[in-house]
Each structure stands twice: as structure tokens, then as C-alpha cells.
Image: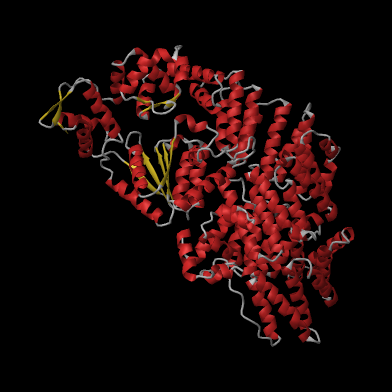
Amino acid sequence: MTELRLRGRDREVAALRAALDSVRGGRGACVVVEGAAGVGKSRLLAELAETARRLGFDVVSVAADELDQYGAGAALQTALRSPGVPDRTSAVSDDERLRLLDSVTDMLEDRAQRAPVLVLVDDAQWADPATLFALRTLPGRLAAARILWVPAVRPESERPIVARMREDLERLGARRLTLGPLPQRELQHIVADVLGATPSPDLAGLLRGIAGNPFLAIELVRAFADSGAVKVEAGVAGLLRHDIPVGFRRSVAARLARLPEDAVGLLRIGAVLGREFDLGTAARMLGRQVGSLLSGIEAVLEADLLSGDGPRLVFRHDLIRQAVYENLPPAVRTALHREAADLLRSLGGRPSEVAWHVVMSGSPVGDDAATTLHTAVRELSSTAPDAAADLAQRIAGLLPPHDRRRVTLLTEAAEYLGRTRRVHEALDLIDTALSGRPEPPQEASLRLAAAEIHQAAGDDDAAMTHLEQALDLPALPPDLRVRLLKTKATGHVYLGDIAAAEATDTGLVDAAYRSNDPALVLSAMVFQSQTSFYRGRLVRAFDLADQATVRAGAEPAALYLRPPRIPALWLGTVATSTDRLADTGRILREGQREAEALGLGWSLPYWHVCRACALFEQGALDDAAVEAESGLSVADELEITRANPQARALLTLVEIRRGDLARAGKHLRAAETASGTDRPPYGPWVSLARAALAYEEGQETVAAAALAHSFGGGEMPRLLTVPPSHWPAIARMALRGGDPAVARAVSEALSGLAEQNAGQQTVGAVRAHVNGLLDGAPGELSSAVTAYRSSGRPLALAAACEDLGTLLAGSADPEAAIPYLEEAGQLASASGAVRDHERIRRHLRQLGVRNGAAPHPTAGAPGWECLTESERKLIPLVVDGLTNRAIAERLYLSVHTVNTHMKHIFAKLGINTRVELTRLAIERGGIADETG
């Protein structure tokens, strides 16, 4: 068909040409081409590819096959990889999704720097899940790159992942081009192109029976021509007879009837094997040697039914394959799929290909087949956990109800769904499996999976119920019992019940240390660190976490733990609350790189949020917001169960300090929706954010009530859930809201903390600060100011200076307040705390001091002057042509952080592309000097 002129698609060609022009101008675009089989999608894509090449585009093309649906790889990634460049994926990984996205992003960004890129995915309804995942995610991430994305898809696809791809792309602004039936006159033009003559009225009349489908028109006309039923006279092509059937399946059957027996057998077996198939496999299914099929191969190639240009034979169009396939009786198709699955498995074929044939056969699964299918599920789970879950359920449906492998598959399916937002499906699946009364070890495994899903979703009570029921079961294997106990102990930590967590450790830690599983050993070390931390033994907690991190570096496989139990991630959390705050950047940077290298994509939101907390403590509000937003963005890309409400709560606190209460309220509502509980680990964060916003809105009693709910008991675990600089704010808001009991509870907790951590300067500073607020004692506040000066926590120092200045302003010597308030104002300004700075200026004006103007707002504000320091550092690197990945490596950042910075830069400057940014930077000049 590519040799024929494209007819009747002028509107679509114009739309695609406009998209090419937009991309050449520097702006990414996406067009979804949709249409029924044979309507001309592939022909349109071929025309687009040729036009793009003439315009200097780098064309990346993927043609999906029906067998790809269970493929564990990513055809798009393979198509992008240059010959001779090794695959960077690891041999074993828990979750490859984010690394897959990063790999494809890097390759596309690199290509788009040199030339505009066209990415074509034909028959996307059959594409492997990893490619579909990239298709629905990367057009948004790479919107500023010169890339045109064009997936072509059939509208009747039953795969949910395909529907989600279309929905996500349209949400991102993709245009949908629907190829409808061609008008009669266009079909007549196509017939004329095929025959070299104008169709006669009787021939044109036959075209009305094919519903405007150009492929069917061509095949029907060729069928007539091949049978000698067409005669051309005076430039008009007419029919000599009308007895050839007009139905396409019957037309193909008629063509097959004229072929040798070997050719027909080859086509039928090939139709079962797939649109592309291996000749050797087909020969084995026919019980023949390849050499004995040469005449049949020659016949199908000459008939133009198959193409043999590559290593496999390919049906020239899937409608041909479909027609041959559907002409086989259903019982024959089922038997052939079963035979194909057995043969491919014996030949060591791809597990995904074997799985497809097993599913198509619908037959019971034997032991060998079950092993191969299980392998296919696990391979698929790393790049597409939701697709792996669907495949596991389909395979489980082919096993007897009481088959142990069935429960194992359903358990794994639930675990895979638990990594996505299909949490309710996962839990329903577990309930269904439990209703079948599985054996105790299998029931315990199901309940463990349910508990971990509930923990990830924040429902710790439901998790505990499952764990307790599992632990009551008899005859559990020792390693499973240890896992259950470990998960239960961690659940108690999440709930802030450290005594219960410690009580759960009845030999648990000792058993874990004796284990040969490095992940279990490290989990025990982190557990000990967590209980020490929440008991207030901060130094011991840091030492244990540090030892676990070092050990994890020597045994990378041990990193396969769930957040926050990853050693380096937990170490960063502990460091943020101790005198080791300055080490958090290095700890988290190295830990996240190791996690990314191992493909632990699901952990990345937690790394970003942990870094955001540390940056907030260090007074870098703008950067803290970027990290929190990056965590939410990564969680959204991966469709993680629930975006961490801690990120939203932290963004609420940042926006309050930056002076945007409306945006703070939006983040708070999202945090409250996501939290689901007022208990740790997220409850205290949400309560603090709720109180801070109410306080700034003048609702001081509401703020105090919110704090009393989470912090009124003075439990150390609740306080330690949030970093130290927030504790004085809790006491201050409680006092001004008329609830001094909360402030006293905080003070008492700090006294106990100070006794256990005598050498921790941060703890001493915070204790003095809270006591100074509680007692109105200038001496305590002065001690806090002195201690804070070397703590690396400028906002905490600013708060202490402001509190001391406010207290002194009402004393007999009000002028003594001025230097403290001026210092507080300078610190707030440097941190981007606009609202704090304005409040401090008001205090100074009341004392007769006219200080400088407020700092420029940065978040969401338009204009070059409102770019943050971190954003300015990126611009000269963009001008130099570095990709986001290269910029991240140059600045020791995560590439997701760079992505978020770039979005902010574009929004503030009112632009959409790197081309525009480069032009503005060059026109402005001196941007490199401005970054220092």
C-alpha cells in the first residue's frame, strides 16, 4: 500500500504537518491516530515518516505485534538504543518502571538536542505494557523537547492500559485524529491507482460493500485481478464476471484455494503464531523440515500475502492474518495455540510468547507450563506491575480451584496491584482468595500482602488485623513468621506505639540477625534504629542507621526494602533531627543514586520528601518546595498507591512562609484527603499544617485545638515525627491559642530528650527556645539564639530572634529588641519567607525602624527577576545544550528535581520550550554571571 498514493486524507495530513511544524519550532506535540483495521493508519504513518525525514527529523518507529501484549521489555527503548550500546538495565530488579522512563527520556533528549524527533508506534493497541507506560507518561515530561509522538491505535481495543494511554495523552493536550471510512469517490481513485484504469460502474458498485475501508478495497480488487476477472478497455476497468465473493474473508479464502497445500498450511500455522512468526517454529508445528517448505514459502511471498525481508516472516497486513485465523474452526485454533505453547516452551521461547498462546488456548495448565508462565508474570512485573497482575489472574483462572500455585499467583497479583493505584482491586482479590480457605501458609502470605498494602495506603489498623490473624495460624514456616512479626513491629512504629513495637520483638531481631537474607538483617538494624529514635536515643539511632547504610553499600541486594526502611533513607531522616543535618545532602544523594541504579523507582517519592524536610530545616524554602513537588510528580508517574501526605503538608508550611495562603490551603486539603489518619507517621504532619494555616488566618483557638489532638499528650514519637525546628512553633501557637498544656507537654518531652542526648546542640537549642516561650524568659531565648547560630537551621534561628525581639520590645528597654528583629528579618528574607519578613518589618516599624523592602516572591511569580537561585543555575547549562540528565549530574541533583525546576522556569517566563529559554537568555545576556 505504501507504493500507492495516499487518498482522502488531506485533513489528517495537514494536521500532522502542522504538528511537525510546531515541533520544528521547539514545542513538543502529540497526535493519537485512531481508526479501524485497514482504514489506513499504517499508510498515514508511513507518509508522515517520509515527510518528517525530508524535514530533517530523526524518526523512531515501533510496529507492535499481538504477541507483545505480555512482553516484559520495552520495544520503544529497544528502537531508541543505538547499535553496540549495551542495555543498562539490571539483571534483577524489583521495579524498573522509573528507570525505564529515565532511560527513554535520556535517549530522546539526546536525540532531540541534535534534531527534532518523530516517535511512531503503530498498532499501539498491541504494544508491550512498558512502551504504553512510556507513551502515556513521557509526552508530559518531555513537553519542552522537540518531539512529536504519534501512536496509532484501533478504537475497539479491550486492554484497559490502552484506554488509559489515550485518556492520559488527551489530558496532556494530545490531538486525536480519527480515520473514518473513505468516501466512494476516494475508493474509486484507489482502485484506479491499483489497476491503472478508471473502475467501471459495476466494479465501483462492489466497493459500496466494504464500508469505505481502503485496504479491503485494494485486496478485493487484487483478488478480482488475480483471478482474471478484470478487463481494461479504453482506460476503464470492468468485471468479466460477478461470481467472486465480495466478503473479505471469503476473498482471502479464495486466494488461499489457488495456493499449493504447503503454502496454505504455512499461512494457517503462521496465523496462529502471530503477525510475525519464526519459520522454523512453523515448520516444526507442520512436522516438516524447513527445506521441504520452500515451494510453499515462495508461493505465499509471490502472492504478496507474507513478507520475508527480515529474520521472521510477516503478514503483509494483519487483516490478512485475521481472515486466515478466523477461517479456522475455534476448536482447531485452541488446539494449535496449545501446541504452539508447548513447542515454544520446549524450545526455550520467550515466556511472554508462551503465555499469550496459553491464554488464547484457554486450556488447563500443566506443571512445566505453570513454571514458564510464572516466569513471564515476574518478568513483566518489573516494568508493568498492573499488566503482570492481570496476566497472573488469567493464568490462575486456568488452574484448578485448590491448586497451591493458583493462590501463589493471586497473592503476587495483589502485591503487583498494590504498587499501583488499583489498591481496591488488590484487596478484593485477596478477599476472594481467602474465601477459598487456603492452607495456613498461603493464607498467611495473603494476609501479609494485604497488611503491606494497607500500610502503604495508611490504614495501619486494617494492616494489624491481617497480621494478627496470620500470626494465629498454625504450622507457619519460620521465615514467614519472622516476616509477619517484622511487619507487625514496623506497623507499631508507624502508629507511634513504640512499647508495642518493642514487645513484638520476642527474639525477632536475634532471628533476623541469624538469617541468610541480607535484607532481613538490615531490616532488623533499621527497626532497632527506629525504636531507639522514637524513644529519644538519637545518637544510638544515628549510629545504627549509619551501620546499616554501610552494610547495605556492601550488599546491594539488601536494599530491597520498603520505605522508610531503606537504610540510607532512614539515616537521612534521623540526621535531619540531629546535629548531623549538614550530612543529609550527601546521605540522600548517594542513597537515591544507589536506589535508582537498582531500579527501586517506588522509593523515589520518599527520597524527595526526606530531602525536602532537610532543606526546610536548612532554610531553603524554594528548594524544599521543588523537592516535595518532585516527590509528588514521581508518585504520579508511577501511579503509586497514595501520594505521601507529608509532601503536601510540607508544601502547606512552605507556602504559608512564602505568603500564599490560598495555595497553602489547596495543599492542606490534598494532605487531609490523603492522610486518612491523625496518627503517625503522617498525622502529626497534617495536624501541624492544619494548625499553622488556621493560625495565620487568625483562628488561633482552632490552631491550638489541632495541635492538642496530635501533640497534647507530649508523646515523644509524635514530636519526633516532625523535625526539631517545628517544635517551638507548636508551643507558640498553642500558647497564643489559649492552650498552655500543649506547650508544657512539649517542654516535658524535650526535657527527657535533652537528658538522653546531652551532647546534641540542636536538642538543647530547641529546649531553651520552648522554655523561653513558655516562661517568657529572655535568658532562655538568648541561649536558644546562641545555640542556633551554629546549627545550620536559619529559620529556627530567625524564629528565636523574633521571639526574643518581640519579648524585649515590651520591656523597659525596647531598643534592645531591634538587632534581634533585624537579624530575624535578614534570615527570613534570605530563606524566601516573605510572610515572616513582612511580619518582622511591622515589628520594626512599631519601634521606629524603617528597614529595607520585602524580598521578591519566587513561587509562581512571573518574570525573570523572580527566578530562584537554583533555577538561575540551570539556565546557562540549558544554553550550553545540556540535557536534563546532564544538568542533574553536573549539579548533583536528581533529574526529577531538574524537571520540576524547568517547569517552574517555563511558568515564570511564560514560555514552553528550551528554544525560547535559550533565546531569552542570550538576549538578556549575563545570566551565567548572575548565578555566581
Q: Position of residue 904 (x, y in %)?
A: 54, 62
Q: Is residue 426 left or right of residue 497?
A: left
Q: Quadrant of the N terminus?
A: top left
Q: Is residue 927 left or right of residue 94?
A: left
Q: Residue at x 28, y 43 (%)?
A: 9
The one of 666 and 901 positioned closer to us in this rendering: 901
Residue 891 in view (yes/no): yes
Image quadrant assignment for residue 565: top right
Q: Quadrant of the C terminus?
A: bottom right
Does 474 sit above or below residue 45?
above
The one of 382 and 387 positioned closer to us in this rendering: 382
Does 764 sit above or below residue 279?
below
The one of 88 and 257 positioned closer to us in this rendering: 88
Q: Residue at x 35, y 44 (%)?
A: 48
Q: Position of residue 111 (x, y in %)?
A: 48, 48
Which residue of the protein is positioned furthest toward the front in this rendering? 84
The one of 616 and 874 positioned closer to us in this rendering: 874
